[in-house]
Image (cartoon, rainbow, N blue to C red):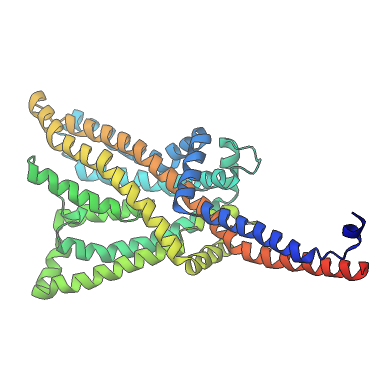
Amino acid sequence: MQETAGRPFDISSQAAPIGGETHRLAGRRERAAGSVAGLWGESLAILSAHSGPIFALGLLGFAGAGIVGQLLNTALTFDSYWRTGSFFSSFFSHLQAQYLAQAVCGAFTLALARGGVTWIALNHGTGCRISLGAACRGALERWPALLLASALYGALILAGIAALTVWLRELRVDPSNLGRMSFDVAGVSYAVTVRSIGALIPDAGSPFSELLNYARVLIRRSASGYTWLARNYGGAALSSAWLVGLAGIAWIVVADALLRMRFAAIMGSADGGFLGALSECVRIGVRRFGAVVTHAWLVRLAVFGMSVLFVIAPLTIAQGAVVAWLVRTAGSFWPYPVSQLVFVVGSSLVTMVFAAFATVYDARQYLALRSQSGAGRTVSAQAAPPNSAGRRTMSAQS
């Protein structure tokens, strides 16, 4: 015992492997947390643990504007019927009022909802008391920056969609190509295909989504853009549209990746400033472009698949078969506005869950990427001092 105690013992030779092993384990845990499976598990756990405030915010921001707009449209439609005896006499003016109401409501509530849900996702597991009121207060404190971020993202995505629409219209698969649906297998299948392609494109958010939908209605009514393109470019129209469409796709992918973490950067920063948060989310998007794009499109493809199976296909089939049967049975067109209201409310409540999950997922990925980028600096800053301190201690003891 005395010989062992008196023998020189260099703790630096063992402290380093222990410290290195600890940091390697921490790094593996961080990589696992930032993996697809890890982020999916975290996001689902957060949705389950805080379902009340998250879904309340989702109802306000992700579903509320669409429901309010459709309620207004339905009320105006029945008012017009009582006055004129026709359900479709003022269809276009009712649609304008609907999109205007959705744009005004959605422009403000969408930013608030995304900020609140992001606040919940960022503060999960920190010991902070999470409630609907706290999430709303956190989002309202940074509401101006959230609005600016929403506007910037929406404008950039809308520009990409405008370019992509040129190509999709040439292929006859743009939502503006979808007119009155024929109630047969071919007509319903075509409608499902067109609506599915539209669902795969990133949403620009209010008020840009309403502007896009209104423009599609105008194009569908006049087809002036399609006619002008065909008349001026003739046989080369398809190849030109193909190039424009590819440019639009590239623009959408890059813009979405660079601004993907915009809400998380705003809610997670110390001061919540717009320029600082924008700089951080762009920096993350550039440095981790592959990871951001991969995670974003995996989530989008999963949501897309569930939307097609449980929202788009069932509602299109119901619209093409069930509603048409109700119209023939009732001998009146009232099932059209009523069914449209039911479809919008039902689909909004379902897609609200998808939007909430995607928002939580982005926030947790932001934390994972930020932790991984800071892990190397933490390890390098903490690894050297214990070893050098151990050598100084042993030299003094010797």
In the image, residue 268 lies at what x, y percent?
59, 54
Is 137 or 211 nearer to us in this picture? Answer: 137
- Residue at the image point whose x is 15% and y is 53% from the top: 221
| Residue at point 54%, 59% (across, down) | 369
Q: Would you identify the image quadrant in which residue 344 lies?
A: top left
Q: Quadrant of residue 59?
A: top left
Q: Is residue 245 left or right of residue 328?
A: right
**Vertical placement of residue 157 versus 143, above or below:** below
Q: Quadrant of residue 129?
A: top right
Q: Residue at x 48, y 38 (%)?
A: 47
Residue 181 visible, this orientation: no
Nearer to the camera, 191 or 342: 191
Q: Is residue 294 left or right of residue 269?
A: left
Percent position (x, y) of residue 370? 58, 59
Q: Position of residue 49 (x, y in %)?
A: 53, 35
Label total for image? 0
On-image quarter of the N terminus: bottom right
Q: Nearer the viewer, residue 121 or 134?
A: 121
Q: Quadrant of the C terminus?
A: bottom right
Asked if residue 386 shows in the view, the reply is yes
Going 34% across and 61% down the picture, which residue do you hit?
A: 158
x and y percentages locating residue 171 in the rendered image: 15, 62
